[in-house]
Image (cartoon, grey):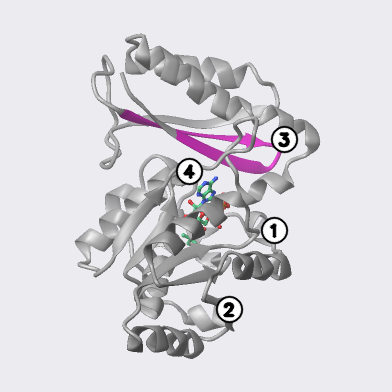
Amino acid sequence: MQVCRTISDIRAAVAAFRGAGESVGLVTTMGALHAGHMTLVANARAAHDRVVATIFVNPTQFGDPADLENYPRTEEEDLAALEAAGIDAVLIPSVDEIYPDGDETIVETTHLANTLHGQVRPGHFRGVATVVTKLFNIVRPDAAYFGEKDYQQLQVIKRMVCDLHMDLRVVGVPTVREPDGLAMSSRNVRLSPEDRAAAVVLSRSLDAAAQHAKEGATVAELDRVIRDTINAERRAELTAVDIVAPGTLARVEGPVTAPVAIMISARFGDVLLIDQREVTP
Ligand SMILES: Nc1ncnc2c1ncn2[C@@H]1O[C@H](COP(=O)(O)OP(=O)(O)OP(=O)(O)O)[C@@H](O)[C@H]1O
Ligand SMILES: CC(C)(CO)[C@@H](O)C(=O)[O-]
Ligand code: BAL
């Protein structure tokens, strides 16, 4: 595995793959890797001759300086995991390498970035779209792999790629969970043991909603089931429940007659966790 810290080094690595006529898949991460990330890698590995990964804790997508400061960083373990998973080249750049001259140029999906979870984290999706555009331009992959856990992020990136005529495929990968159902997340390591145990309420609330949807519940009833389940856990501070049409993320109402996506977020102490599930009537 080639470990590249500069744009010119990763471009040289990718140019060599391209010179040999090989296809390239990309997995972008902020490090502190877990089995969710490795599933993205496995999907890319199965579909491409070469797989490139990036590890970059992107400052422009963090609103809260403490969240950026406390974000887990485990570079040595991450590089070992990527090598073991058969990654061909990894880009692990400095902030100056990615933002050499500030942030004069930004990329924003105007509506999609500022609705739903974008209102819980103002500016977040603008930072994501900007850095993902930079990473796409640097690596120029045939396809890039993103987790469905970050559901709005996936829709933002799909829409950006479509609207800006970017020449790659965006592939969504289902959420990987801990044995008790908690969605894997790099931030889980920041939970106290009590909050870690309590956080299972997120996936439990989604399971309850899925069951109600099968039994013919309305959107308002799904919303109520989720709120009641999460509010019954005193360690959880519910921040959002959004029930939307998959893809467009438009809010839906009335009886659930077609698949809907449920996006939820809650704080446990100072850690904001998200989860998501598509449910069918
Ligand atoms: N549990 C998961 N299952 C599948 N994909 C995941 C999972 N968790 C993260 N990913 C995906 O991995 C990629 C990199 O995510 P990132 O490095 O931010 O990790 P993370 O676990 O989402 O961290 P955090 O939520 O704490 O920011 C994203 O495409 C994300 O959607
Ligand atoms: C896509 C991403 C790598 C952009 O920084 C990040 O938001 C993430 O890890 O999900
Ligand atoms: N997984 C999304 C990156 C973030 O929370 O900033």
Q: Distance between the residues labelled 1 and 4?
A: 18 Å
Decide: marks 4, 2 in contact (CB < 8 A)?
no
28, above or below 23, in the image: above
Residue 188: image quadrant is top right
Q: Residue 72 carries which label?
A: 1
Q: Earlier in the sequence, mark 1 or mark 2?
A: 2
Q: Nearer the viewer, mark 4 or mark 2?
A: 2
Q: Residue at x 35, y 78 (%)?
A: 22
Q: How far apart are marks 3 and 4 (CA)?
A: 18 Å
Q: Disc 1 or 3, which lies upstream in sequence?
A: 1
Would you name the residue on which mark 2 appears?
A: 1
User: What kind of residue is marked 4?
Assistant: Lys
The amino acid pointed to by label 1 is Pro
Look at discs 2 and 3 and give the one toward the viewer. Answer: 2
Q: Mark 4 points at which residue?
A: 149
- Residue 164 visible in the snapshot: yes
Q: Which amino acid does label 3 sit on?
A: Arg
In terms of depth relative to the viewer, which is nearer, 49 or 15? 49
**Structural distance between the alpha carbons of marks 2 and 3:** 34 Å
Asked if ligand 1 lies within 8 A of label 1, the reply is yes
- The C terminus appears in which quarter of the rendering? top left
Mark 2 crowdedness (10 Å alpha carbons): few <14, some 14-19, many ≥20: some
Do residues under tags 3 and 4 come within 8 Å of each other at their CB atoms? no
Q: Residue 275 colored magenta? A: yes
